[in-house]
């Protein structure tokens, strides 16, 4: 594909240029144009259109180091694929929590929505809702006031239930079990661990690259010892 241009007007133009290089594969039954969301889809669409091939998409999301959104911890993709940056060492403090559903913002959305749904489905509120619907005009105002007070009480109960469930599910021990962490560090051991981790990173940084070119391998070391309360 040496003849392809280096600059393109947009992603569609890039896809059209790529399609020209792939024309020998046009109309082949075993050809599939696969686009990565979001930027890869316009490219793949142009290829699929030119080659008369089916189009499919793959959901991909970068996993960023907490507090350093530009530094990739790894990536996850549809189908259960997960790749972690081998140059990173990830640790968490014992007793903290790790969100495993897309980060703290996603956890907050799921948490709040589930608390709201569970509250409204509570049998006590359901019964009071029916009573309001059947009450006369004089009683509705009183029952609505009772509903508001009961809603606050039940919402507080469901909040506690959900918090306990999230604490069980989103523990650092589960994150370690699924491979999202390398180590769980007791607070008393954090300082010596950090010193040793930096030393390991320096050792990797100064190790000669394979191939004997004399240049040092450039690996980044980031230690994530943070609390992400879901």
Image: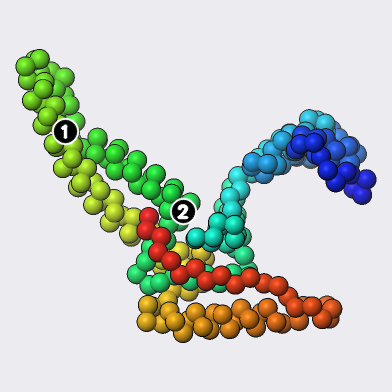
Q: Is residue 200 above or below residue 160?
A: below
Q: Is residue 3 above or below residue 69?
A: above
* Marking on residue 88: none
* Marking on residue 148: 1
Q: Is residue 111 above or below residue 148?
A: below
Which residue is rendered at x = 48% and y = 74% of the image? 183
The picture places residue 145, in percent across and down from the top left corner, at 12, 29
- Residue with the most extreme top position: 137
Which residue is rendered at x = 68% and y = 78% of the image? 205
The picture places residue 178, in percent across and down from the top left corner, at 49, 63
- In this orientation, does residue 74 appear? no
Q: Is residue 190 left or right of residue 37?
A: left
- Residue with the most extreme right position: 3
Q: Residues within 10 Å of mark 1 (few under 14, many from 20)?
A: few
Residue identifier under label 2: 103
Callouts 2 and 1 close, C-beta under 8 Å: no
Q: Earlier in the sequence, mark 2 or mark 1?
A: 2
The picture places residue 204, in percent across and down from the top left corner, at 66, 79
Residue 58: which quarter of the image? top right
């Amino acid at each position: 594909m040496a003849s392809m241009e280096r600059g393109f007007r947009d992603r569609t133009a890039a896809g059209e240029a790529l399609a020209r290089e792939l024309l020998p594969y046009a109309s082949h039954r075993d050809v599939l144009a696969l686009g990565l969301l979001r930027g890869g889809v316009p490219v793949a669409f142009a290829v699929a259109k030119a080659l008369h091939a089916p189009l499919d998409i793959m959901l991909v999301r970068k996993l960023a180091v907490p507090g350093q959104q530009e530094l990739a911890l790894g990536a996850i993709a549809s189908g259960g694929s997960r790749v972690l940056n081998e140059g990173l060492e990830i640790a968490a403090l014992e007793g903290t929590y790790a969100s495993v559903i897309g980060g703290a913002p996603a956890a907050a959305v799921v948490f709040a929505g589930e608390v709201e749904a569970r509250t409204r489905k509570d049998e006590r509120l359901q019964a009071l809702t029916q009573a309001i619907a059947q009450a006369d005009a004089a009683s509705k105002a009183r029952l609505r006031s009772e509903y508001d007070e009961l809603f606050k009480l039940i919402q507080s109960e469901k909040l506690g239930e959900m918090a306990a469930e999230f604490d069980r599910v989103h523990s650092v021990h589960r994150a370690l079990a699924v491979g999202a962490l390398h180590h769980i560090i007791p607070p008393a051991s954090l300082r010596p661990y950090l010193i040793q981790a930096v030393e390991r990173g320096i050792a990797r940084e100064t190790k000669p690259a394979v191939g004997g070119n004399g240049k040092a391998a450039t690996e980044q070391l980031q230690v994530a010892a943070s609390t992400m309360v879901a």
